[in-house]
Amino acid sequence: MSKPIYPQNSKLESAGFTLVELMVTVAIMAIIAGLTFGNLNSTSNKLKSSARTLQAKMQQAKLMAVKENCNVFVDFDLDGDNAIDSFYTLWRDADNDNSYDDPVEFLETVALPVLMAFGSVAGGAGGPTKGASPTSTVTPVADGISFSGNRVRFNPVGTASNGWAYLHAPNKDSAGTYAVGSNNVGRVQIRHWVTEGGTWR
């Protein structure tokens, strides 16, 4: 069997990457990672995440109320002093006495992230104003919670308190206002007011 004959002046191509190509690739990847990380940690995304977490916790409370045949509460004023906390708690009314003074009824505490608070962007700064409530003509309340008694009650039949919890970033009005609420039939929903947008989305 004869050996293959290659032309004298041919050179085999290199199969690797050059150092310059590798450095350019690494630099591009670093830039993309930096932009992605910065976007994920932005105030707007933290505010949206906080609102979605509250929505999920309210859904969880509703499902637990139906499954365990008892009232489940999401409370925004744990000590009852009419000052909204920087966190909210979930409670299971195991003995159906419409209160939760027994420690075994406590489920969990969810703290708001740093720089997030209950309330809304002021109307003068582009926030929601009278006639701009997510479902009615009521102005968002000053403390950010419109639920009676500053708590949401989910009942065993799936119904709930009617109201809204408003969230915003006090140091960044441009992030807008989120509203998380429930209605009498137990529907949990979320809305976003874009600053200067003039409407809920």
Image (spheres, grey):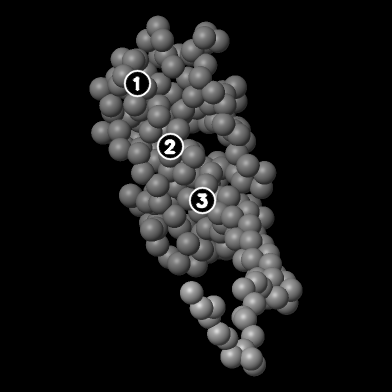
Asked whether residue 147 appears in the rendered view, the answer is no
The label on residue 56 is: 2
Residue 16 placement (x, y as % from top left): 65, 72
The label on residue 48 is: 3
The first of marks 1 and 2 along the sequence is: 2
The residue type indicated by label 3 comes to Lys
Give 56 or 73, whichever is nearer the viewer: 56
From what the image shows, is residue 121 above or below residue 29? above
Task: From the image, tell me which residue sits under label 1.
Answer: 65
Name the residue rendered at 62%, 73% in the picture: 15
Name the residue rendered at 63%, 57% in the picture: 37
The label on residue 105 is: none
Q: Secondary structure at mark 2?
A: helix
The first of marks 3 and 1 along the sequence is: 3
Classify 10 Å Cα crowding around label 2: few (below 14), some (14-19), many (20 and above): some
Give 148 or 64, whichever is nearer the viewer: 64
Residue 109 placement (x, y as % from top left): 57, 26
From what the image shows, is residue 24 above or below residue 55? below
Classify 10 Å Cα crowding around label 3: few (below 14), some (14-19), many (20 and above): some
- Callout 1–callout 2 Cβ contact below 8 Å: no
